[in-house]
Amino acid sequence: MFAYIWPLILVVISNTFYQVCAKSVPDKINPFASLTITYLVGALMSLILYFVLNKGGNLINEYKHVNWAPFVLGLVIVGLEVGYIYMYKAGWQVSVAQIVQAAIIAVLLIFIGYWFYKEAITWNKVVGIVVCLGGLFLINIK
């Protein structure tokens, strides 16, 4: 059970700090300049954790198994992070931005799961879509 729950806890904690950090990027710094520091720290941390958690690991051998996904993920992460920074610079509230994007993504991923991964669209998911759309309506009422 712990193996199932701890990644969720890590994502929740990390995403909470992520939103606070994205909201706290100074207005005077270009978001891309800020991200160069972010990615240098992230790359260094990934390198350290790779060797700490894989005693005797061989990074070059690992790279032999790479496919397209890490390259596209790198591009997508830049879009994700700079998108949040610009959302907050544009005035989005931290309490709203995450909820709005999460609801939209939840609905999109139901259809992506169906089309690309043959996941079933159940009545629970249909109700979830309705709830997400209703939540978007309610959260954006002025």
Image (tube, rainbow, N blue to C red):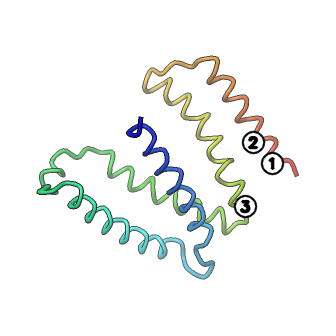
C-alpha gap between disc 2 and disc 3: 14 Å
Q: Is mark 3 on a helix, strand or loop?
A: loop
* Left or right of 135 on screen, residue 98: left
Label drawn at residue 136:
2
Disc 3: CA contacts within 10 A as few (<14), some (14-19) or many (>=20): few
Q: Amino acid type of disc 1?
A: Asn
Q: In this view, does 16 lie above or below 115?
A: below
Q: Earlier in the sequence, mark 2 or mark 3?
A: 3
Label drawn at residue 11:
none
Circles 2 and 3: CB atoms closer than 8 Å: no
Q: Nearer the viewer, residue 10 or 141?
A: 10
Circles 2 and 1: CB atoms closer than 8 Å: yes
Residue 120: horizontal and vertical position, in percent? 52, 18
Q: Is residue 32 above or below residue 5?
A: below
* Left or right of 3 on screen, residue 114: right
Residue at image mark 3: 93
Q: Amino acid type of disc 2?
A: Leu
Residue at image mark 1: 140
Extreme-bottom residue of the structure:
28
Residue 15: horizontal and vertical position, in percent? 53, 55
Q: Residue at x 66, y 28 (%)?
A: 128
Tell me the quadrant of the picture where the N terminus can be found.
Answer: top left
Q: Amino acid type of disc 3?
A: Gln
